[in-house]
Amino acid sequence: MEKRNFSSQLDEEYFETVCENGLKIIVFKKPQFNASYAVIATRYGSVNTGFTENGVHYDIPDGTAHFLEHKLFEGEKAPAFERFAKTGASANAYTTFDKTAYLFSASENFYESLEILLDFVSHPYLTEENVKKEQGIIGQEIEMYDDDPNWQTFFRAIDGAYTTHPIKKDIAGTRETISVLTPELLYKIYHHFYCSNNMTLCVAGNVSPEKVVETANKSFALKPNDNICPDEIIENKGVSAKRSYKKLAVSKPLFGIAVKTELEKVALSDRRKNEVAVSIALELIAGGISNFYNKLYSENALSDFGYEYMTSNGYAVVNLTGVSDDPERIYSEFFKSVKKLTDGKTDENDFETVKKNVYGKYLAAFDSIEDVANMALSADFSGSNVFEPAEIIKSITLSEVIDAAKLAFCEDNASMAVIMPQDE
Amino acid sequence: MIIRDYSERIKLCLIDDRSFKSNFFAVNVIIPLDKSNVTESVLLPNVMIRGTKSCPDIEALSRKLSLLYGASLYADAVKKNDNLVLSFSVRFVKDRFSLNGEKIAADAVGLLFEMLSSPCFESNVFKSEYTESELKNLRDRIDAEINDKRRYVLKSLIANLCKDEPFGISANGYKEDLERITPETLTKRYREIMANSKIFAFFFGECDENVICEGLFSAFDKQSPFSEAVSEAKTPCGEPQFIREEMAITQAKLAIGFKAGSLEGYTPAETGLFNAVYGSGATSKLFENVREKLSLCYYCASRVYRQKGIMTVDSGVEIEKYETAYNEILSQLDDVANKRITEREFVSAKNAMRNAYNSLKDSFFALHDWYLSCFIAGDIYTPDEITELIDVAEADRIAEIASLFKPQTVYLLSPKK
């Protein structure tokens, strides 16, 4: 393997290499695990809404990345699930804003399963008939999300926070947008984005890095494409909607607050640090030790509360979700708590306490082969590596956290979506 | 894995591990499900995690957990067969990973014991502020059951399927009980439970066993008598009862409850294998046929409760197709019962099960849940023992299990017209 990375602090190591065809491979050796996990992903997700090839521009209908994810499981000779059934591997896939990923975990026949994964991802089999059938299945999946209040608050808040960014689009699309998909168009899109130099394979478990690379060289059939040209993503200042409301069958109002970071203000080399800084800021603003959370929870004004900072190359957005009779109050209390931090009124001891918390949670992710491999994949797609946060958490200062918070929690970039109960 | 039988009442399951970053420690208090006190029992963990003697509120607890490198403390109530399990646990990073040599383990384990034995009291009863606040949260949680349609339907199905049995009791409790719960009644229930329940503790990681058992013996009297639920499996009878409910939703949900009578003559590997062949996972008949081939449902899956002799099948379906889906779900069960199981289906189910049991060993959460279930069932198997049983299981036995299951309740949640 070309490169071995070891962290004595974490007692972890991984190997990475780029195959001759351009496929990047990252392998965590974790011999104490009974199963091994593999995930291969392409830099193609729901935010990719068009591309140019040989001077011709192609629009991509909403929901296509997710549609292709479903379709790749269909093989010419046998569906992927049927092939995995022979090895016993448990396979799945997911589509996010910025990637489509295919994965499996297996406690036996790992390399055989890896062959199947790499083979089915590189051999699409699309016919008029099987595309039509999938339109029905995905239509049912979309209906399921329509009824899911948590899903709705999350996506409606993001939709409100962005103006033109394709992060606004539903990952699964709508029944209408996917109805125009044909095998020809799907093949065209597939061949543009599914190419070796646009993909990364991450493996964690009781495996040999050399054998993983050998298997990839044998079974991964895709070639590099030097002309990958996705549409540029354009986003304006401000939000498209400060508030949005919808009624569903729920008992109490659910809210989602999204605050986008103007990413162009964060240098590419500072992105990882920004991510850690905002995560620490979130703990200080809204975590278990914050006045914000303790006051609202003890008054029964807030429950089922959660928060995260979602980052990628093309977007960074803070998401808060919860249940409350008075979402407006949560919104204003949250920004008061932000102000306390950005005004420099946070105790240095609280900062040191939260750093330990964030470090411990980061460490705990290494206890799962799934988490490690997906963490490594996301880091790679962001041009970073999985050990970087350890050093950043140790050395970051409160003033750096405050600077990041000023950018990440700007109220001009915030939107709130509320799902309200139906009228009696 | 070592099981310590400290007494009839208290057992400890110890798994030594040197390779994970975290340790995990759980204490489970097992009480027979009883409708007359279930709401109080369910409320207890929520009030207990609001504060302890030395960390009297959420802020103090959060601060302590953060200083222990992001240790996670959990307290909840789950239904296992005819029991309610109050489960208290803590996950924490091993001492050697702290940045400045701080010791974490002793404090984290100590905090869990403190939550159990020294809750935040005022005048010898639970703080009224916490009791009232958690009563409100519990009311909200019961109301919010409709938010997650899939879970709501399964819960309503089981409540009807096991109407006059402990298993039909809600693990969220009942709204009509909330009014009469006070800090005094709650404290009384707490003392009863601490004195008279069966205890199953679980430790995964590197530990000093003396610290664990000293903590257990000081929290719980080793010899005191305890009550125990004997789970019963009812035999099926009569035609299925059909229940239809309307809600403002887009996708209908169809759930079917089956009873088989006692499945005690079958090993967990056999009932698990039946479930895998019929309706659990991507190799099952329900997935391959009802979802993939016929596109009748977006999801369609079965679950078997072996001790209770019960099975549920639930699906998300377009309302126009629910009858077709229902017939197909039964027809697939009929195929299994009549041994129409192909070699490929049988081997695939075995492979998937072996993989699931081998993988279970890679997660302390999964191991804890597994051994807790075994302990409650009164049959302890290691995951490796189950995989051995899977290897020797025969298709005829799987067909036999299928033939025992009869539909008893059908629950349809349909979109409002």
Image (tube, helix red, strand yellow):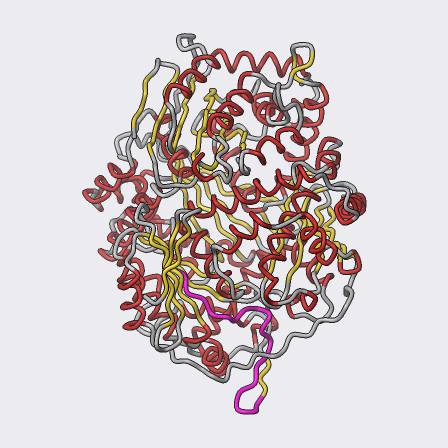
Q: Is residue A101 left or right of residue A239?
A: left
Q: Residue at x 68, y 60 (%)?
A: A158
User: Residue B200, how many percent across, how many down?
Assistant: 41, 23
User: Residue B302, how many percent across, how many down?
Assistant: 41, 46
- The picture quadrant where one finds residue A200 is bottom left
Q: Is residue A165 left or right of residue A37?
A: right
Residue A296 position (above or below residue A254): above
Provide the residue span drawn in magenta. A39-56
- The picture quadrant where one finds residue B11 is top left
Q: How many marks?
A: 0
Residue B20 position (above or below residue A188): above
Residue B123 position (above or below residue B45): above
In the current view of this chain or complex, which residue is farthest to the left? B392
- Quadrant in the picture for the N terminus of chain B: top left
Q: Does the magenta portion include A49?
A: yes
Tell me if residue B415 can be seen. Answer: no
Pick the residue in front: B367 or B253.
B367
Tell me if residue A27 can be seen. Answer: yes
Q: Does the magenta portion include A58?
A: no
